[in-house]
Image (cartoon, rainbow, N blue to C red):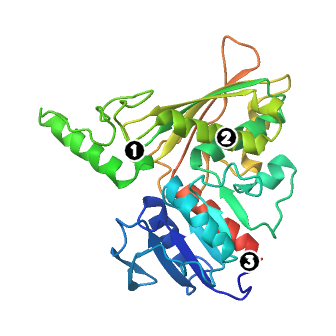
Amino acid sequence: MSADRTSQKIVIAGASSLLGGELKSLLEESRFAGWELRLVDEEDAAGTLTEAGGEAAVIQRLEESTFRNAKYALLAGSTAFGSLCAAPAREAGATIIDFTHATLSDPDATPWFPKIEALTGRSVAKHAKTFSVFSAAGTAGSSLALVLEKFGLQRLVMVMFRPVSESGRPGIEELETQTSQLLSFQPVGNPVFGTQAAFTLLPRFAVESRQDLRREEAVIRAEVAAALSEASEGAKVSLCLVHAPVFYGTAFSACADLGEGADMARLIGAFKEAGWNVAGEGEAGPSNVSVAGESQLHLSEPRADLSRAGAWWFWGAADNLRLSAASGIKLAEWLEG
């Protein structure tokens, strides 16, 4: 079944998630304001009262008719819920814009972030029916690697710092609670992370945690690999994901070995052309706080390593929710023409 081309219905699956809320807010500020918006989520969130388009709205459960006549299905909840929604959305003829990574390994899914066409030289087909939207971390890693390919990239090592908002509201609430308890010299509870997440950096959470940093790291690696496409290029990129005790904003530190001819001016020009906001000389570098509400990738001025010729250091940050949501909205607007 194919959706009516004149349909003006959008379904947000995973509407109660932080990303779902960000998508709803951006849709109401975009060319899609005024379209019919249907909010759905898993059973435990069904029945939640919210608002859409300035009016009261109820988040509904997934039903057989959920995606009927929908032009776009925005999958924004858990990966499992995204997988559950993908098939009925596809059968209903909706164009799937997936933020959950449920379709990342689907050979029929098109990888997406703004500027991917210009950076890869590969065109994105408007007639595609499934798009896998990269996370902020995946977008940063992919764009960084693709820009640096122009400078003879030999090796790229990235350490990414993950905010607790990647764990949704339960993660935010646990960090808030732990922070308060520690400042009051009380023992901390840890049902989400299985360990102390406040005031500490971690390479992984406890075994009883609901969160798996290594699995999330593998997803980011898969996003970068999908953007680079060639295994030889993907092999040049090493990546590590670390928990940071902050609420919002992804940050990263990276070191790249580049060929001859790389200099600060050329690097800055290439990153600006690729859509990055590069801090000017004398400006403070971007932080997880300074990028809040921004839909761009932000970068400090590249810095040459003092002890290794051809090595360059990069520091960047992005709003992990806003950037990904804005990327998906830009895609939908581009598809509309």
Circle 3 residue:
336
The residue located at (55%, 75%) in the rendering is 11
The residue located at (67%, 40%) in the rendering is 222
Q: Position of residue 93 (x, y in %)?
A: 70, 76
Check the image and name the residue furthest to the top: 307
Q: Position of residue 285 (x, y in %)?
A: 53, 38
- Quarter location, residue 159: top right
Tally of marks: 3
Q: Earlier in the sequence, mark 2 or mark 3?
A: 2
Query: Residue 222: which numbered mark, if any?
Result: 2
**Relative horizontal placement of residue 288, taking residue 147 as reference (left or right):** left
Q: Residues within 10 Å of mark 1 (few under 14, many from 20)?
A: many
126 is higher (above) or lower (below) than 159: below
Circle 1 residue:
164
Q: Residues within 10 Å of mark 3 (few under 14, many from 20)?
A: few
| Helix, strand or loop for disc 1 | helix
Q: Position of residue 198 (x, y in %)?
A: 30, 35
Could you give the CA–CA distance between mark 2 and mark 3, rounded to whole angstroms?
28 Å
